[in-house]
Amino acid sequence: MKSVASLIDALEAQMQKVAELPGVDAVHDLRVSVRRAAEGLRIFTPEARKLRNEIRAIREHAANVRDRDVTRQLLRRHRLPATDPACVYLQGQRDLAASQLRQFLALQLGDDRPARWRRWIGEDA
């Protein structure tokens, strides 16, 4: 079983990856890392509610992007062309959500939140 600190390490790596390039797979992997870290904190550090809430905020920002990615995949399955107004609008909304996610992650990484989280659980970086 991975330690909570290693789950935070994995989360930090995904945060950095998405902050640079928020591709479809990277955003999905970020959400998975958030869920794993939050669950590890819940099981092994139950009093870390504030920490879990901070980490969940990342998932909420990523969900805005991921939801649009999933919708785009559905539209492609129905063979809607990329030039269809719905697809164009959805792409614009995805781009906006991805930009907001990148900004949020940059703030989190700039504050060195992952190191603070590791210190809080008693496992320094």
Image: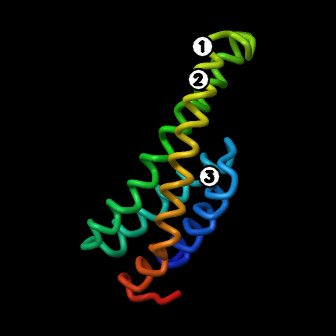
Mark 1 and mark 3: span between their CA atoms? 26 Å
Question: Which numbered disc, 2 or 3, marks the residue that appears first in the sequence?
Answer: 3
Query: CB under 8 Å between callouts 1 and 2?
Result: yes
Residue at x-position 42% and y-position 80%? 116
- Report crowding for label 1: few under 14, some 14 to 19, many 20 or more residues within 10 A (C-alpha): some
Q: Work out which quarter of the rendered image holds the N terminus and state it.
A: bottom right
| Vertical position of residue 87 compared to residue 6: above or below | above
Which residue was labeled with disc 1?
A: 86
* Residue at image point 59% right, 20% down: 89
Q: Secondary structure at mark 3?
A: helix
Q: Residues within 10 Å of mark 3 (few under 14, many from 20)?
A: some
Task: State the separation of the CA atoms marked 2 and 3.
Answer: 21 Å
- Residue drawn at the location 53% of the way across and 39% of the way down: 97
Amino acid found under the numbered disc labelled 3: Asp
Question: At label 1, which amino acid type do we have?
Answer: Ala
Q: How is the image coloured?
A: rainbow
Please tell me whether mark 2 sits on a helix, a strand or a loop: helix
| Residue beneath disc 2 | 90
Q: Amino acid at mark 2?
A: Leu
> Distance of mark 1 from mark 2, alpha carbons?
6 Å
Q: Is residue 31 left or right of residue 113?
A: right
Q: Earlier in the sequence, mark 1 or mark 3?
A: 3
Identify the residue position indicated by label 3 in the image: 29
